[in-house]
Image: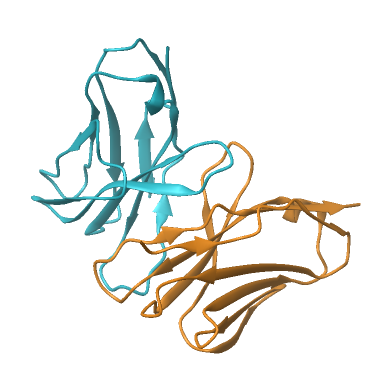
Amino acid sequence: QKEVEQNSGPLSVPEGAIASLNCTYSDRGSQSFFWYRQYSGKSPELIMSIYSNGDKEDGRFTAQLNKASQYVSLLIRDSQPSDSATYLCAVTAESGNTPLVFGKGTRLSVIA
Amino acid sequence: NAGVTQTPKFRILKIGQSMTLQCTQDMNHNYMYWYRQDPGMGLKLIYYSVGAGITDKGEVPNGYNVSRSTTEDFPLRLELAAPSQTSVYFCASRPGGGDRGYTFGSGTRLTVV
C-alpha cells in the first residue's frame, strides 16, 4: 500500500523564522509531489508542486525533492502567524490517472 | 468561475438514512474525486472518475456509490448511513495531464447519529 508519512506536529516556530516541513513516501515510482495548506475548518489549497529533484522556489515557499531518499520537504521563510495551518503532502505515482495519496498533515503554529 | 461547488455544507443524518452529496465543477475538468477527512487524519479517497461514464473505487468505497453522467457533476451517494460515515467530505477536480494539483470544493460536514 502506498504511504505518505508526515510528522503530525504541532511544529511551533517564532514569527520571522524558517519553518521546515518534511514528508516521506513509500512508492519509489512516484513522480509528482504537492503541498497543500489547510486552515482549520477549510478545504485544502494548493501552494506548491514539484516534479524534479532539487529545489523549487515560489515567494516565501521552497519545495525540495530527493527521489533517491524518497523525501520531499517544504520550507517557509519569514514565517507569519497567517501561515499557521495544517500542511498536507500529496504524492501521485505517475502522470495520468493515478489519484493523489495524502499524508496526515503537519500542523504548523507560528508564534508572534 | 465558481470552481468546485459542494452542497450541502452541513447535514445531520440518522442511522439508516440515505443522502446524496452534490458536487459540480464549471472548469471542464475531466478528473473528479471524492475524499473523506476524519479529525487528525489525512484525506482518504472514496471514489474517482476520469471522465463522464467512468468511475473507479478508491481506498474506502464501502457504503458509498457514485455516478458521472456529465463532465460537470459527480454526486456521492450514501446508502444506509452509519456512525462511521461521520466525516468531512471533499470533492475535488483537475484538468487532464497528470502534473496538475486538485481544486477542492468547500466540503460537506456530515454527522450520523
Image x and y of residue A83, in percent: 73, 56
Displayed quadrant of residue B66: top left
Q: Identify whether A97 is placed above or below A105.
A: below
Image x and y of residue A42, in percent: 56, 40
Residue displayed at 83% across by 69% down: A78
Q: Identify whether B45 is placed above or below B78.
A: below
Which residue occupies the foreground of this view, B106 or B98? B98
Q: Identify whether B39 is placed above or below A13.
A: above
Which chain is drawn using cyan? B
In the picture, the quarter occupied by the N terminus of chain A is bottom left
Q: How many marks?
A: 0
Displayed quadrant of residue A106: bottom right
State the hue of chain A.
orange
Residue displayed at 39% across by 76% down: A30
Which residue occupies the foreground of this view, B92 or B85? B85
Residue displayed at 59% across by 54% down: A105
Image x and y of residue B23, in percent: 30, 38
